[in-house]
Amino acid sequence: MRTMSFAKFLIKPVAFLVVLILLDQLVGAGFRKIYFSQRVGQFSQTTYAIDSARQDIMIYGSSRAVRHYSPSIISKIVGLSCYDSGRDGLMIPYSTAMEEISLNRHTPKLIILDISPRELGIDQSKYEKLSILLPYCDKHPEFIKYIREISPFEPYKLLSKTYPFNSSIFILGTNALFPKTVKKDDNGYLPLEGKMTKPEVDDYSLRMNKRYLKIKKRKDIPEEKGISYFKTFLNNSAKRNIKTLVIISPTVLKNPFYLDNQTVEKELIVKLTRQYPNVTFLDYSSDPHFNFRPEKFSDVFHLNKQGSEEFSNSVALYIKATLTKKI
Amino acid sequence: MAFVPIYILILGFTIIIDYLAGIYIEKAKDKRRRKLLLAASLIANIGILAVFKYFNFLNLNIDRFLGKFNYHDPIPYLTILLPIGLSFHTFQAMSYTIEVYRGNQKAERHFGIYSLYVMFYPQLVAGPIERPQNILPQMHTEHRFDYELMKSGLKMMLWGFFKKIVVADRLSIFVNSVYNNPELHNGTTIVIASIFFSVQIYCDFSGYTDIAIGCARTMGFDLMKNFERPYFATNIQDFWRRWHISLSTWFRDYLYIPLGGNRVSKPRQYLNVFIVFLVSGIWHGANYTYIIWGILHGLYSVVYMIIKPYLRKEPQSKAAATAIRIGNMALTGLFVTFAWIFFRANSVTDAFTLIHDLRSFGAKPFFGDGISNFAHSILAIFLLFAVEYKMEYYPEKFNFFNSPNIALRWGSVAFTIILILLLGVFNGGQFIYFQF
């Protein structure tokens, strides 16, 4: 009886495992098809940035890159093609991965990296969010070393064909069901609508000051791995002698990194960029054209369309005036 | 909270003390001697808990108090880590000696079996806190491989993993971003984060419990139920009949009843209830946030006991009964969620900052790095409550996991695994209750 029961236990799970593997393959294939047939939205932008982008100017960074740089304005003023491959919520490890994959394919004339000092601070989420690269790992094994940052087991999880599409069901669903509601990007650029109000900025300023009182005594320790990714990014462009602009884009408060106890990280960015002759650092976080100008911001982190166009204009004019001759 | 191999000795120490105490309590004819032996066992257990969990907290408070008079506490702080699951296994060990003392349980002569009772790995770190009457006899029985128990246990574990990976760890992303930066968020965001935390802690803890009970079941052991869909509770007493049942009943049996229970005057009964919740708060951790959480639940329970006789019992129609039930569930959920603010906040100051900022409820909420994570959180909550609703009101219907139809049975299990792969958060970290 015991033997029979145990044999039953062995046979049935094997049969169930086969069913599960088949279902996983089927669901995974379905998701793959939907994912790579996206024509609008952030997944299609990422796919384009990874597989196809060959513009003269390549922009990397987080949501502030996506929302702040208009490639059409930059192209019009500078006279070079431009693509914005930033991605919401992603940070320096992602920018480095995207730069590496794109430099394997072509050499742009100018690279822009939008960075925030917090990207060099301790924040595990910057690695966890690299899961966005999972759907591309089979075609681009270069990404495997990046996804190991999420967990050393990540490459094994890729045995599942469904897992690479983890957490993408909402975006895939809305893009597939309501394609007309998805905003079309301008070469990766997606400006934000809406304006902040003065009371909102004042409230934010108050909250940041309150927070500063709480955190000011904490020791500000940058994260070695984050710094290493930043250095890799700069090394990659230096090796190919590509002119590179590292930019801290405008903030609604004047230099909020001080209030966020990230002064050390900011100084590190300045120090490291100085070590590379091909790199220029621009800091807009204390620019009076943007600080405390709520009408130019959509929220406390991002410029709105008006603000981003003004900012793109300013960056483009700088490139034209100082760098075009050298490119 | 940590696993340090040398800390096994602590477990070894309490096991030896309680093993011997059990035997000698049973042997002792003299009531005074029995009492003394029980006291020695309880002091050893509570002493270990006090040193590892509360010593530094007490020392800090003494230091702060003396500081007001320009004195300094000369007692040094201990540089020790809290052994994993300490509060759970000491409580389980204490229940053994108390039950032997009361004559409800025979002293265990087999040292290996008694050690297993304390260290039974599925429930060692976060319960359910078992009673010797339930688990010790099972440890004396030979357990043969049982296909049905194995299947049922694995399915229970799967549902536990769903609760932990799909719901709790998903919600924790939003909750952590708000609760770790309380100054930066408005009332709307705080309300959403607090509701999310209510669901997160339930799924984190009950998910662990399901995994523990399921794991034990695969080996033929039947552990006690620890949760009974607590957010369907219609009042605070009902909530505590459904939440962390093994701890609530532990406090009922070993604290509330010895204090006099409800065999005393009403005011004394209220005090007893309040004491139980205060101790429960302290049990959770050496932090004022847990103490306030316990006090709040004590107050809720006492107020409910006072107003209970005045509450209308029989609604006139079925519709009215449903409306009242939903209203009561919402109200109970509201009070429980408010208390969770203290439980989750990193400090009492943070908790009051969050409560103060509730006044800006209605302002545009913060969605983190985009709406996607938020939408997945809502989807996870919806899936959870759809299943919980079925289990609460239609326990016999739609039992897909146990359907006689093999396609439905296998399909539902496989679909749940696929859902975990699609919606799960796989780097969510530790179970919250492992720290207690």
Image: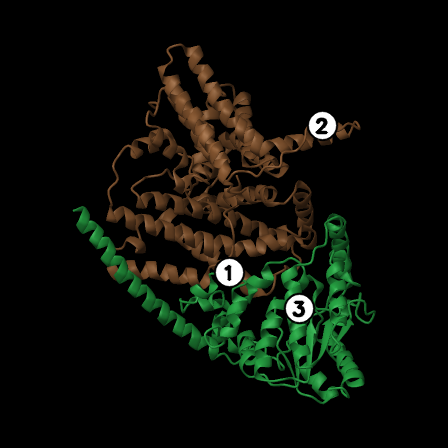
Chain colours: A green, B brown
Label 2, secondary structure: give it: loop
Q: For mark 2, name the chain.
A: B
Residue in the foreground of this view, choosing between B267 and A144: A144
Residue identified by numbered label 2: B74
Q: Which mark is residue A230?
A: 3
Q: Furthest-left residue in view?
A: A1
Could you tell me residue B72's position as x and y percent?
Answer: 75, 29
Furthest toward the bottom, the residue is A79
Q: Amino acid type of disc 2?
A: Pro
**Horizontal side of residue A131 vs A326, given as left or right:** left
Q: Do callouts 1 and 2 point to residues on the same chain?
A: no
Q: Residue at x 63, y 62 (%)?
A: A225
Residue A284 drawn at (x, y percent): 78, 70
The image quarter in which residue B366 lies: bottom right
- Tell me the amino acid under the disc marked 1: Ser
Residue A228 percent location from the top left of the image = 65, 65
Of the numbered discs in the image, which one, if any, rests on residue A151? 1
Q: Whole-Å distance between the Cαs marked 2 and 3? A: 47 Å
**Circle 1 SS class:** loop
Inspect the image, locate mark 3, and give the three-letter code of the amino acid beneath it. Phe
Is the residue marked by circle 3 packed among few (<14), some (14-19), or many (20+) residues within 10 Å? many
Q: Residues within 10 Å of mark 2 (few under 14, many from 20)?
A: few
> Mark 3 falls on what kind of element?
helix
Label 1, label 2: how far apart the Cα atoms are: 45 Å
| Residue B112, picture quadrant | top left
- Residue B261 makes an appearance in the image: no
Q: Are marks 1 and 2 in contact (CB under 8 Å)?
A: no
Chain letter of the residue carrying label 1:
A
The residue at 68%/28% (across/down) is B75
Q: Judge left or right: residue A7 versus residue A122.
A: left
Whether callout 1 and callout 3 share a subunit is answered: yes
Confirm whether residue B82 shows in the render.
yes
